[in-house]
Amino acid sequence: MTAADVALLLVAGVLAGITSTVAGLASLVSYPALLAVGLSPLAANVTNTTALLFVAVGAAAGSRPELAGQAGRVARFGGIALAGGAAGAALLLALPASAFERVVPVLIAGAAGLLWAQPRILARRGARPAERGPAVLGAVLLTGVYLGYFGAGGGVALLAVLAVAIPEPLARVNAVKNVSSGFANLVAAVGFAVFGPVRWAAVAPLAAGLLVGGALGPLIVRRLPADLLRVLIALAALGLAASLAWGAYT
């Protein structure tokens, strides 16, 4: 790997880390960067998932005010995401990535719509508890599977599920999402380190950038109005869904 490749991955990591913690779309930046330095799609996928673990570390450090009092939520959703990530990593090593490509655009578009409708869903639900319900826990598990399998837009999907389940400011929900998704990446990274073609020379600069970007992202989220943040994330997710649909259906 050349010095230019290292520099590219470092910069891409910072941008991906910010994008991940703000909008849950890290792979939109980091995955193409890995392809650009010569990795195969499978190697880029497992290397990307392994490096993304460091976003959660940076986000946890940068989101301490938002995470205050939410240790129980992080443990509950993180544990479920971890189980899903293990299943997703096993699927990736057993099945071709093309097995999921036609479903992914629909998943991401649905997450964007769910996030867009979040205020109306919460207003209609009122004070009725939802975050411990089987529908929410099942959705978090399936999102963890997706994060371990492919991951592009998985952060948006997890944020959408948590945002309509947890009646808290979006910045606090986003902090839970950032750390919980890290559990899915953790177990997938362990599996890939043992069984997958991880390119460690690429992991190091990408992870360093992701760590920095993950810590910077919460500072941006903290200063953005919640409604603006929600709309920006939904629009970015729709753009990703359209891009993935073009690749899958054409």
Image (cartoon, rainbow, N blue to C red):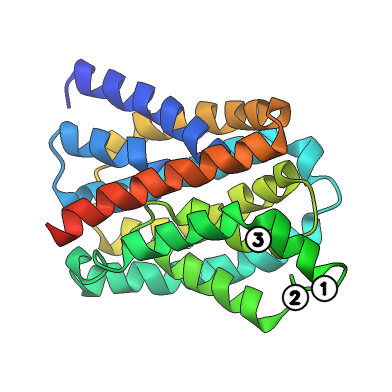
As drawn, is 26 to the left or to the right of 192? right
Say which residue appears at 75% left-offset and 62% top-offset.
Answer: 122
Q: Are marks 2 and 1 in contact (CB under 8 Å)?
A: yes
Distance CA(mark 1)–CA(mark 3): 12 Å
Q: SS for tag 3?
A: helix
Q: Residue at coordinates 33% horizontally, 63% vertically from top-left? A: 104
Q: Which residue is mark 1?
A: 129
Horizontal side of residue 129 vs 98, given as left or right: right
State the image coordinates of residue 14 (x, y, percent, origin top left): 45, 26
- Label placed on residue 162: 3
Amino acid type, mark 3: Leu
Question: Where is 134 relative to 88, above or below?
Answer: below
Locate the C terminus by quadrant. Answer: bottom left
Q: Farthest residue in the bottom direction? A: 134
Q: Residue sitting at 35 percent across and 46 percent down?
A: 240
Q: Earlier in the sequence, mark 1 or mark 3?
A: 1
Q: Nearest the camera: 27 or 204?
A: 27
Which residue type carries mark 1? Pro
Number of labels in the image equals 3
Instruction: Between residue 200 and residue 69, name the one nearer to us.
Output: 69
Q: Quadrant of residue 166?
A: bottom right
Q: Dot 2 lies on which element? A: loop
**Local crowd at mark 2 within 10 Å, few (<14), some, or many (≥20)?**
few
Q: Which residue is mark 2?
A: 132
Residue 71 visible (yes or no): yes
Q: Position of residue 2 (x, y in %)?
A: 17, 21
Taking the image as shown, residue 41 lies to the left or right of residue 81, namely left
Residue 147: x and y in percent read: 43, 60
Q: Disc 2 residue type? A: Arg
Name the residue nearer the viewer: 239 or 185. 239
